[in-house]
Amino acid sequence: REILAAKRIQEEALAEQKRKMILDAASTKDAATIAQQRSMRERPEVMIIEDDVFSRKLVDNLLHKHFHVTGLGTADEALDTYTRLAPDVLFLDINLPDVTGHELLERIVTLDPNAYVIMLSGNSDKENIFKAMNKGAKGFVGKPFSKEKLLQYIE
């Protein structure tokens, strides 16, 4: 029992270390550079960070005809990819396996004050919504979501 407890503590410490590395690994691009990237592209960029493969694929299938869609399953590459692509809209899951969506939202808004982030979650309680909006989210979409709801936020 003690060995299992020690192993669990070690795994939790490693997960916390990885979480901190992810949040600290942001690119040095500033908001002006991100805004410039947005203004130069021909087709709007939509990014989704969602650990559920089905939800990512659904967003891609609904939007790919009109937008360039990039999907990621974890927060691990999210900050670097965000600063590289400078998406016009980011759909961000609250419950990611490596970092919470709330933490990632905070970091993205710090990097890009003009970020347009819409939170996704199966947990649509008021506290979760208020927390996301207070951290800079522009909207909140409960799962399951519809094409109309996604397009509403993109427009």
Image (cartoon, rainbow, N blue to C red):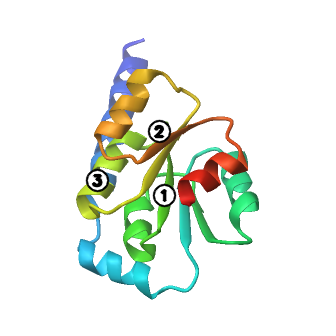
**Mark linked to residue 113:** none
The answer for how far apart the CA atoms under marks 1 and 3 are is 13 Å
Q: How many marks?
A: 3
Quarter placement of the N terminus = top left
Whether 81 is drawn above or below 23: the answer is: below
Name which residue type carries label 2.
Ile
Name which residue type carries label 1.
Leu
Please tell me in which quadrant of the rendered image residue 78 appears: bottom left
Look at 54% across and 71% down and name the residue there: 45
The answer for how far apart the CA atoms under marks 2 and 3 are is 14 Å
The local crowd at label 2, few if under 14, some if 14 to 19, many if 20 or more residues have their Cα within 10 Å, is many
The residue tagged 3 is 107
- Image position, residue 91 (x, y; %): 52, 52
Whether 11 is drawn above or below 155: the answer is: above
Q: Secondary structure at mark 1?
A: strand
The residue tagged 1 is 90
Name which residue type carries label 3.
Arg
Of tags 1 and 3, the one toward the viewer is 1
**Mark linked to residue 94:** 2
